[in-house]
Structure formats: structure tokens, C-alpha cells
Image (cartoon, coloured by chain):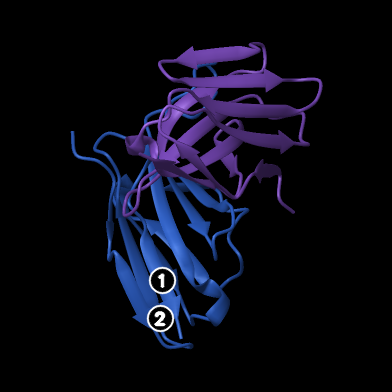
Chain colours: A blue, B purple
Amino acid sequence: EAGVTQFPSHSVIEKGQTVTLRCDPISGHDNLYWYRRVMGKEIKFLLHFVKESKQDESGMPNNRFLAERTGGTYSTLKVQPAELEDSGVYFCASSRKLIWGLAGVADTQYFGPGTRLTVL
Amino acid sequence: QQQVKQSPQSLIVQKGGISIINCAYENTAFDYFPWYQQFPGKGPALLIAIRPDVSEKKEGRFTISFNKSAKQFSLHIMDSQPGDSATYFCAAANDYKLSFGAGTTVTVRA
């Protein structure tokens, strides 16, 4: 089974430019999550998709960030325009079921290798 | 505000020694406490997890101890091996949303 893949692995852009990060979840995983780790701090939740629908985007920093999930498959996270504080590692994760869903069974979130974004 | 506080930031242990990482949380709504292990260039991978109705869970050389009243939990790595050198993240979840600690970089010296 192929794991979660992310592209690109690294991106270096100038402040004010636009960057689009892509995530391909594990096939069959309806749940897709974006997280971000900034400057060696904690990994923070950004948003959660169930199939193509955004279920929770409470962690999105501001309206410069836009996430989409076309057809419930891959997802993109666009930052426009990028600011210095957006630098960090962006992780995508996917799971079959919600953690601690109605069945009371936790399902693992599988993480991709991350995209390291540097805004200069 | 950081919902899960993790310490230490880094630790060095000799091969065969015990590594201990501690985490504390405030939100009593958390009901799932996983630990993730991350190697350089890779994403975090689930290592072991515990529910709050259990005080301890052991899988191989890895043990989670959970103290619900103190709102603290810890990871013990017994007989640490060089291959255990990685960054470890504790986390807490209420439903789907994981709240992570800041991570602990563990270095095991041969």
C-alpha cells in the first residue's frame, strides 16, 4: 500500500509569491488533514476534509491560505501571498475513519513526509 | 496556546538505557493520547497510543504511563537502541483533531 505522498518536498519562495502544496492520501482514505510545524514548535492542525468537503478549517491561520480537495482525492494547499511567518513544514495526513468516531474506535492518521516551505 | 506541553526538548541516552519523555495537558475533553515517532525526512508515524481509562500500555520496549488525575502522560523507551534515535511527539485528541507537543529529539549513543 502506497503511503501519503506530498509534493514538493521543499519550496523556497519570495515574500509575496504564491505557492501550492499537493497531498495525495492513501487510496480509499476519506479523511484528509493538513498540519503545520513552524520553527521546531508543535505540529498544529490546520484543517480536515471528509472526501471533498471541508469539515473543520478552524486551524487555518488566515485567508491567505486556501485548501481544496478535488473529487475527494488529492488535496492542495495554496498560500497567496506568502509571508515570512508561513515558513515551516506542512504535513498532510489521511485516515479511513475518524479518530474516536461513532464506533469508538481510533483509526490511525498516516502522515506524509511533509513539504518544507521557506519564505524569504 | 499550546494544548500539550512536552519535555525535555532533547535527550541523549546510552545504548541500553531508558529514555523518558513527559507530556502534560489541560483539556479534559481529550480522550485519545498517541505518541508519534519521526525520522529525518519522514513524516510522523504512530508508535503507540492509550485511552484515558487505562493507566499503562506496553508494546515491546515502549510503554505509555498515563495519570488522568494529574493530566500527565509519559513515554518510556526501555533498552534504548541507536535505531530509536528520532524525534518523538506526544499528542492528544478529541475526535479527529490531534494536538501535538513540541517534540523531543532522542539520541541514542552506541
- Look at 62% across and 28% down and name the residue there: B74
Residue A93 x, y percent position in the rendering: 40, 44
Disc 2 from disc 1: Cα separation: 11 Å
Residue projecting furthest to the left: A1
- Front residue of B95 and B82: B82
Relative to B5, say whether B84 is above or below: above
Residue B45 x, y percent position in the rendering: 39, 37
| Left-right relation of A91 to B10 | left
| Left-right relation of A71 to A119 | left
Numbered circle sitting on residue B37: none
Q: Mark 1 belongs to which subunit? A: A
Disc 2 versus disc 1: nearer the observer:
1
- Look at 71% across and 50% down and name the residue there: B2
- Front residue of B76 and B55: B76
Q: Amino acid at mark 2?
A: Thr
Same chain, labels 2 and 1:
yes
In the rendered image, which quarter contains the N terminus of chain B? bottom right
Numbered circle sitting on residue A18: 2
Q: Which residue is mark 1?
A: A117
* Residue A31 visible somewhere in the drawing: no
Relative to A58, say whether B92 is above or below: above
Q: Amino acid at mark 1?
A: Leu
